[in-house]
Amino acid sequence: MIPGSILFSIGISVGFLLITGLILALLLILAEKKILNYGTCCIDVNEGEKKLQVPGGGSLLSSLAENEIFIPSACGGRGTCAYCKVQVTEGGSMISPVEEPYLGPEERKNQVRLSCQVKVRKDIKIRVPKELLSVRKYKGKLLHKRPLTYDIVELRIELLEPKTIDFVAGHYVQLESEEYDGNDRVMRAYSMSSPPSDKNHIELMIRKVPNGICTTWVFEHLKEGQEVTFSGPHGKFHLSNTDAEIIFIAGGSGMAPIWGILRDIKEKGNTRKATYFFGALTQKDLFFVDELTKLQQEVPWFKFIPALSNEPANSDWKGERGLITDVVARHMPDCSKNEGYLCGSPGMIDACIKVLTKAGMTEDRIFYDKFA
Amino acid sequence: MDQLQNMNFFVSLVLIFTSAAFTDNILLARFLGMCSCLAISRKVDTSIGLGSAVIFVTASTTALNFLVYKYILLPLGIEYLRLLTFIVIIAAFVQLLEMIIERFSEKLYYTLGIFLPLITVNCAILGIALFMLNKPYTFWQAFAFGAGGGFGWFLAITLIGGIREKTKENELPKGLEGPAITLIIIGIMALAFVGFSGMIKI
């Protein structure tokens, strides 16, 4: 038997902790309702082009997303990717210490802010690029997920709602992952590899990032037939309006926008000359070689040069060997009249920019999408 | 102890404040609140921001906890729950404070408010609240003790921030960079603060 006095003191302690906890929790909930209630605020986009009524207190990024305006963001609003910059001309409040490192003096003068760090506390006026207003949220169904190499898959998605998408070859969408194993939903950017003429499908190439939240979801949880959501199109990466000869350089899943652009050029009957340098480590990192070789045979304007940097010396590989930058330098000693289109990791892009500028290409003729 | 009760009210407050700030410096004599100190003391500006937030929170939570202890825990005979109760009260208070600051002063929020979530888990604040129970303080004396302890922490982190800012560019052996040299700096400062010991005895 437990003596009554012990039971009594246990009862008192438990009761006391319970009551204190409840009172404090209640107090905090009430305080949040009362103190952090900013009422309804108005977001004015591009001087009256759109006027949104949103509940105050949220971040500008999420308030806009709830109203179907999707500012690109790769980190999901944590203030680390600095993609979600918008111009806040009125009601933006102070620059927070989180934003400081990402805003240069020119941007500060233009009132550029990270929309994920700006809280909507009063009426606010913002300016965003016009094409962002055409960005929409899409629902689709995954038709197939096929492995291209051991760590890259291709997704083909049929659009359900809305049924069609208009985009320029080279642009990207933000794929939204679902919750799994305690990971929240995140949005990540992937270039579309399908040609724009295929209006009710998109194709993406996704490389597995070790411990990546979205790519792990794609590789391990996403099943064919499942519903997926994404927003888009975004991006500035697309062919210019000139006749200059094109140099494409991309490795791995960086092929996605270029595969889209190539198919687009072919469909439109353009004859602009193009060379595609595809960098990979070994033969097992190569993919679409047959398709690209076939394209090279079909049209006179296209040349495909795959290069391997880590292939064993005694293998049966007959193509180019060495770092992609060295291969480009060997084939293109003079690039002064060409345009460069690059897609890949920041390290590879910086190295390629160096090689191209050394061969005479000016930086305004080099276009790229850096995917970290 | 008896002196304290017989002393002039204001003199006792000043004495308690000074002893808590200097002779019994919470960071340098008791080595509490070390984690946020190591993380934030890189610059004087941020050290001052965090330090002022700590002063404010220690002073107010020590007073609050004093009242809770004297009028709720003691009468109910459940002093042994002081640790849990103090933690919960400090956390709730800091949350509430952050909301109020965010709502009413944007400037204060960006200089002080962003440090508040860091403070919730600062052991110096809990430490001061618990040490306060060792002495038979009255309400205002407990308040002075809390404010003094917070001021001591503020002083220490600001000084450390100043030294780190000055020595930022200095070349160091690889193994001593970052937290290692900071701990050595704190150790030497603690030695200096030993000079205050014995000055005030309460």
Image: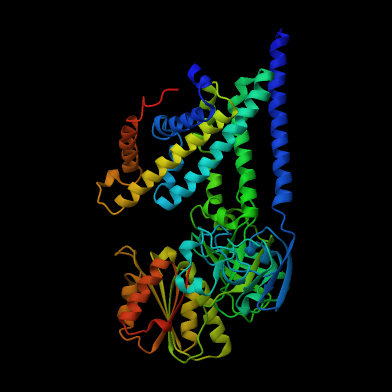
Q: Nearer the viewer, residue B89 or A357?
A: B89
Residue A166 place in picture, x, y as percent: 65, 79
Q: Residue at x 63, y 64 (%)?
A: A61
In this picture, residue A172 sits left or right of residue A300 = right
Residue B22 quadrant: top left
**Would you place residue A203 above or below residue B176 in this image?**
below
Residue A90 quadrant: bottom right
In this picture, residue A266 sits left or right of residue B194 = right
In this picture, residue B199 sits left or right of residue A169 = left
Residue B121 place in picture, x, y as percent: 53, 38
Q: Nearer the viewer, residue A243 or A292?
A: A243
Residue B53 place in picture, x, y as percent: 52, 45
Any part of residue B137 in sight: yes
Q: Quadrant of the N terminus of chain A?
A: top right
Residue A96 place in picture, x, y as percent: 53, 59
Find the residue positioned furthest to the front: B8
Q: Residue at x 35, y 79 (%)?
A: A356
**Would you place residue B117 above or below residue A148 in this image?**
above
Any part of residue A372 in sight: no
Q: Residue at x 52, y 72 (%)?
A: A256
Number of labels in the image equals: 0
Q: Nearer the viewer, residue A209 or B1?
A: B1
Q: Residue at x 32, y 71 (%)?
A: A321
For the rendered model, the colour scheme is rainbow
